[in-house]
Amino acid sequence: MSFYEQNIDPTLRFGDVLKGFIQSTPQFKKPLQDISSLEDGFNLNIEVPKYSAILTPCCSIGEHKLTLCPFVIIPGSIAFVKNPIFANDLMKINLRITAEESMPPDKWQELSIEERAAMLVKGKSYTFGHFFVYDKHDYLQSYELRGEKTSYYMIDFRTSYSIKSHLIKRPNGGPIDKALCASKLLQLSVEARSSLREKLSSYFARVPEEDLT
């Protein structure tokens, strides 16, 4: 499966890779109930991620708003990189896998037969459900991962943010503004976009145990 389209459309789509957008993240000790709460202090972190992915569904892009999620490098210390199935193919983090595949072989062998059976009966599921890995590409800056150069990146659904701009509007069948078009670096293939949509939907559709009783 090709992860990226060879030719990109002059419009914005779910999953597109953009550059040049600002992310702001407020940090505070407690909610601001009234103006006096400002005395407790708060911080507003401003960053410009190298790349961001569009998480707004294609049909909802417009009205001057867009939801983005910043790209982050994959740290060599992250748990899933230590699992051979992911270490050999980082893109498998985007797929549903069996319980046995979800952990290193030595960890699986430590489980009792009953524990393995209980996990296997649940079928395939996402591991690290809040992460989605973007395939490497020459347009993406390379970095070092466990001693090798790579340009795989990932997004963490928990860090998504919104932006506003009068440039963001429905193209009505025509191309988007030139400035926005210049910010679009890569476009996902239909298959990759579907994979992102399914994992994102699964992440937000999880039902807590207390709601199942």
Image (cartoon, rainbow, N blue to C red):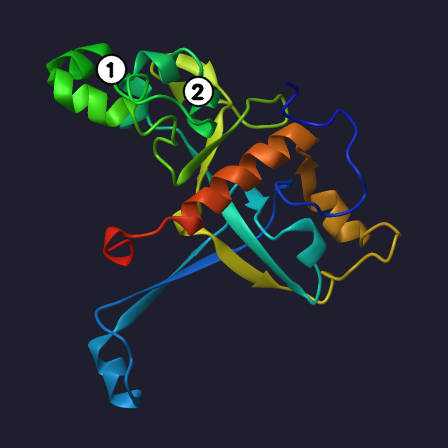
Residue contact between numbered discs 1 and 2, judged by CB atoms under 8 Å: no
Quadrant of the image containing the N terminus: top right
Which marked residue is nearer to the observer: mark 1 or mark 2? 1
Q: Earlier in the sequence, mark 1 or mark 2?
A: 2
Amino acid type for the residue under numbered disc 2: Leu
Which residue is most to the right? 174
CA distance for labels 1 and 2: 14 Å
The disc at residue 162 is none
Q: Which mark is residue 104?
A: 1
Give the residue pinned by disc 2: 90
Residue at x-position 27% and y-position 81%:
38
Helix, strand or loop under label 1: loop
Q: Residue furthest bottom?
A: 35
Question: In this rendering, would 174 be left or right of 70?
Answer: right
Assess disc 2: are there few (<14), some (14-19) or many (≥20) residues with their C-alpha within 10 Å of its C-alpha.
Answer: many
Assign the C terminus to one quadrant of the image: bottom left
The residue shown at (34%, 34%) is 128
What's the residue at 38%, 17% (across, down)? Answer: 86
Q: Quadrant of residue 126?
A: top left
| Residue 164 rendering spot, x and y as whole percentages | 61, 65
Number of numbered markers: 2
- Is residue 53 something that shows in the picture? yes
Residue 119 in percent (x, y) is at: 24, 26
Indicate whether 159 appears above or below 2.
Answer: below
10 Å crowding of disc 1: few (<14), some (14-19), many (20+): some
Q: Amino acid at mark 1?
A: Pro
Q: Secondary structure at mark 2?
A: helix
Q: Position of residue 149 (x, y in %)?
A: 45, 15
For image coordinates 44% across by 20% down, the residue present is 90
Of the pair 212 and 183, the residue shown nearer to us: 212
